[in-house]
Image (cartoon, rainbow, N blue to C red):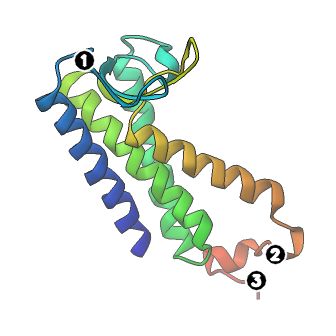
């Protein structure tokens, strides 16, 4: 249950930073944090990562609800037995709910982290996006480096044993 607190923390930080950007900055306003490298830029995204699938809000909302359901199921099944996997799922959960709230409330996601490398501008993103990427990265690492002998049997996860 403690990993749901991680999701809640991510959600609160995500929504708080988005609220700040919406209330204190004009749309497309940019504030240099580290000149020529890192900016807070008030931006809105009606699509997915990197702006793909613009204006497909119902698709994103339905998919997000399905993903949230799957993640909650996995967190319940893990019951804190695998701390890093639980942390990863909780991070993804917090980020998914954060962006879902934006999509339902306004039809677009508030983005503001803006990195520039020379003339290249990395796509603008937010706390929820960061949490999702961190969670997915942890899951990939666990999947790639988790040895077979550390893998639990299906019975130990579900609590059912053959007689």
Furthest toward the left, the residue is 23
User: Which of the two marks, 3 or 2, is nearer to us in this view?
Assistant: 2
Q: Which mark is residue 162?
A: 3
Q: Position of residue 113 (x, y in %)?
A: 40, 32
- Nearest to N terminus: mark 1 or mark 2: 1
Q: Is residue 64 above or below residue 48?
A: below
Cα separation between marks 3 and 2:
20 Å
Q: Say whether residue 87 is left or right of residue 1.
A: right
The percent coordinates of residue 79 (x first, y second) are 52, 76
**Going 41% across and 45% down the picture, which residue do you hit?**
95
23 sits to left or right of 150? left
Query: Mark 1 or mark 3, which is nearer the start of the sequence?
Result: 1
Pointer 2: what residue? 150
157, 104: nearer the viewer: 104
> Disc 2 on helix, strand or loop?
helix
The residue under label 1 is 29
Look at the image and tell me in which quarter the C terminus lies.
bottom right
In terms of image quadrants, where is residue 129? top left
Residue 90, relative to residue 36: is it above or below? below
Pointer 2 local density, CA inside 10 Å: few below 14, some 14–19, many at least 20: few
């Amino acid at each position: 249950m403690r990993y749901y607190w991680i999701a809640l923390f991510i959600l609160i930080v995500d929504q708080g930073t988005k609220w700040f950007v919406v209330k204190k900055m004009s749309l497309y306003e940019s504030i240099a944090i580290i000149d020529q490298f890192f900016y807070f830029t008030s931006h809105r995204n009606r699509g997915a990562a990197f702006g793909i699938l613009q204006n497909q809000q119902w698709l994103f909302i339905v998919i997000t609800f399905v993903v949230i359901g799957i993640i909650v199921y996995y967190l319940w099944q893990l019951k804190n037995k695998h701390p890093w996997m639980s942390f990863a799922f909780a991070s993804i959960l917090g980020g998914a709910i954060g962006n879902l709230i934006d999509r339902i409330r306004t039809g677009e996601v508030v983005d503001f982290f803006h990195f520039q490398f020379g003339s290249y501008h990395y796509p603008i993103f937010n706390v929820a996006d960061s949490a999702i990427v961190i969670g997915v990265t942890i899951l990939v690492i666990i999947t790639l480096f988790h040895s077979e002998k550390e893998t639990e049997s299906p019975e130990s996860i579900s609590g059912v044993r053959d007689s």
